[in-house]
Image (spheres, rainbow, N blue to C red):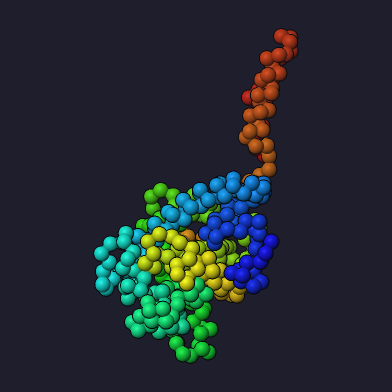
Amino acid sequence: MKSDPKVPEGHVDRFPQIRHSPKQHGKTAHACWKFSGFHEYLLELSRDPTTRRAVMTLGMDSVRSADTSTCKKGVPLWLLEDPTSPLDPPLASVKDKTHRGLAHPAFARALTPMDWEATDSVWQQVLEGERQLLSDQLPRFIFPCSQEFPVGKPPAWGAVLEHACKGEVCLRSAKAIFMGPDAALEGDGYHKGKPGNATIIGMTEDIHPTNHRWGRNSGILSLYPPMLVSLIESQVRFALSSRQDWIKLDGDFDYEEFFWTIYGLFDDQDFADNIIALWNKAVFGAAKARVAAPATAAGRSSLAQIKAARALQKAAATAPASTPAPDAAAAVVAPA
């Protein structure tokens, strides 16, 4: 199988037989982790490409569409540091994306690469084709709104990079997608109403490090793998753009390459641990200490006792009349 030039160097693909778009790849990987035997089933389907594509695409496109819809409606409300402040100028409609992207200063600022000045003149250069927004650049929206960008001062970029993937709009979008739209602007771990996507796909289950299969971040419980962070960042980027319908290539911008650009940040172990902990806390709330169940004395289970009583009753029913019938109730031995 040929190597993918978009995949960061040194990245180990845990699912090399299932290489789709980043959104398909992420959801496929999670399905393989969650459901025993699903990976082998997909490999069987790989013998029939038509069937494989039909099975994989139907569900994943539906999930992507739902996530896209959530971000499309919510991102304008979650973009500013203070979500109670109105956009200036206000959007005429959250359904029409025509006035997003470089057509609106707040959206244009969010899409500006971290090493560019966020000014009208720079945005005009992009519109006139003198500059390109490329997918290997880190846009400002992945950073906190208060982040300062030392444009023209390369030595200072290391400290800035530590705050990547901490953008408010990204964390709010993650909470909305996995815990429900009402959770976006609430506190960490907030949820109400019917189960959110996190519950449906089992992300909220109590997972032990010993049976954790992502194997990416030692010493931390990675309920929220880097791949899902990259997916959310990609969804937010699309919601900020003026494109009405999802498309892999938006001019010079390649969403698949952008996915791998974000994913490549997690090659730094300290950064990965810090960001995964932050996203877990924002979406699921503070981790609760595990309380060991009280010790119980060894002995036969209730089911074993009931089965023993039933066996004695059957024996009594078939025993000769001269044989005293055993007392079945007395045979149920209380736990030791």
- Count the marks: 0
Outermost residue on the front side: it is 129
Residue 285 falls left or right of residue 13: left
Can residue 170 be seen here? The reply is: no
Q: Is residue 203 above or below residue 311?
A: below
* Residue 31 image offset from top left, x and y in percent: 58, 52
Viewed as shown, does residue 296 lie left or right of 135?
right
**Where's residue 158, x and y in %?**
53, 84
Side of 303 relative to 69 (left or right): right
Q: What residue lies at 38% left-to-right and 81% top-to-bottom?
A: 125
Q: Quadrant of residue 239?
A: bottom left
Residue 109 at x, y percent in the picture: 37, 77
The answer to which image quadrant residue 215 occupies is bottom right
Task: Specify the quadrant that holds the N terminus.
Answer: bottom right
Q: Residue at x 60, y 75 (%)?
A: 268
Which residue is the extreme one toward the top? Answer: 321
- Residue at (67%, 64%) from the top-left corner? 2
Which of 298 and 303 lies nearest the eye of the viewer? 303
